[in-house]
Image (cartoon, rainbow, N blue to C red):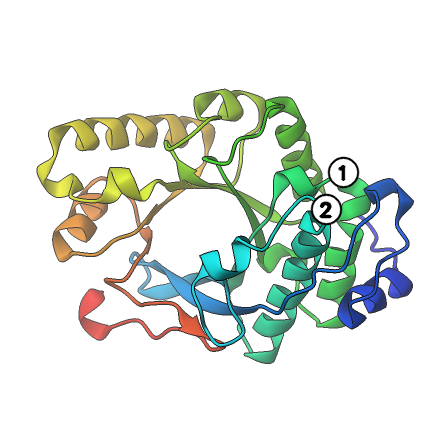
Amino acid sequence: MIKIQPVPSEFAALEAGDVPDCEDCGSAERVGFRFDYAYQPIVDLRSRTIYAHEALVRGPEGQGAMSVLSQVNDSNRYRFDQACRVKAIKGAAQLGIQEKISINFLPNAVYKPEVCIRTTLEAARVHGFPLERIIFEVTEGERVEDGPWLASILREYKRCGFLTAIDDFGAGFAGLTLLADFTPDLIKLDMALVRGVDSNRSRQAIVRGMMHICQDLGIEVIAEGIETAAERDFFVDAGVHLMQGFFFSRPAFQSTGQVAPQAW
């Protein structure tokens, strides 16, 4: 675990909406729009508990994620990525979340991992949220031209004490090549593989193959996008106990979602 070096001027600047003084991270414009978070639980069926809550970006009045992400561009991407981390941690602390939180980050917004992580470390310190309860997840479907660069970002986050996850695994551009460069703590299977898996032999074969790889590498698997009892039961039989989806709980805007009793 590394020692956290306070950076009050940069943290305060992000909270106030001013441009931070961070030459190593490049010139960043203020975000220029408002956003908030909904939180969706990731359940652990083995212990019948909530494992974590994923922080999902929303408009200021609960509008969908695309209403926010459509406003992100090259001039505000770094600022937005940094502000997301601070806001997700602050919101989780205010809601009294005791479980882990999972925060999505934009790899193309990271210029120098060991510098760009400072604001996150300071947010965790200020709001009293333990680093080991923060998961940073990156969408595998996002195009990242330099796979080793992405792996280096994830390694730095892991070195700082965060958990790491690859979202939408099996959907996009990195896939197994990324696993060859970096072993995350978790992968979240792409929803396209989850949907109707109970009645689709091809999906079943692919999922079981991924399970074998993850077991060999010591990676936990999360099945996300679960919408039916049949999908849940298939993954239970396959040895997956971490799940997320509407079957358990919808994202709750500015609050934590409650798991439906029958979903267990």
The amino acid pointed to by label 2 is Cys
**Mark pair 2, 1: CA separation:** 17 Å
Whether residue 189 is situated above or below residue 213 in the rendered picture: below
| Residue 55 point in image, percent of width and height | 51, 62
Q: Is residue 149 left or right of residue 256?
A: right
Quadrant assignment, res 107? top right
Q: Nearer the viewer, residue 207 or 38?
A: 38
Whether residue 75 is situated above or below residue 67 in the rendered picture: above
The residue that appears at 80% across and 52% down in the rendered structure is 118
Toward the left, the furthest residue is 199
The residue that appears at 45% across and 36% down in the rendered structure is 219
- The local crowd at label 2, few if under 14, some if 14 to 19, many if 20 or more residues have their Cα within 10 Å, is some
Quadrant assignment, res 129? bottom right
Dot 2 corresponds to which residue?
160
Quadrant assignment, res 34? bottom right
Dot 1 corresponds to which residue?
111
Whether residue 74 is situated above or below residue 8 in the rendered picture: above
Q: Which numbered disc, 2 or 1, marks the residue that appears first in the sequence?
A: 1
- The local crowd at label 1, few if under 14, some if 14 to 19, many if 20 or more residues have their Cα within 10 Å, is some
Mark 2 vs 1: CB contact within 8 A: no
Q: Is residue 75 left or right of residue 197?
A: right
The residue that appears at 84% across and 46% down in the rendered structure is 27
The amino acid pointed to by label 1 is Tyr
Mark 1: secondary structure: loop
Q: Is residue 228 left or right of residue 36?
A: left
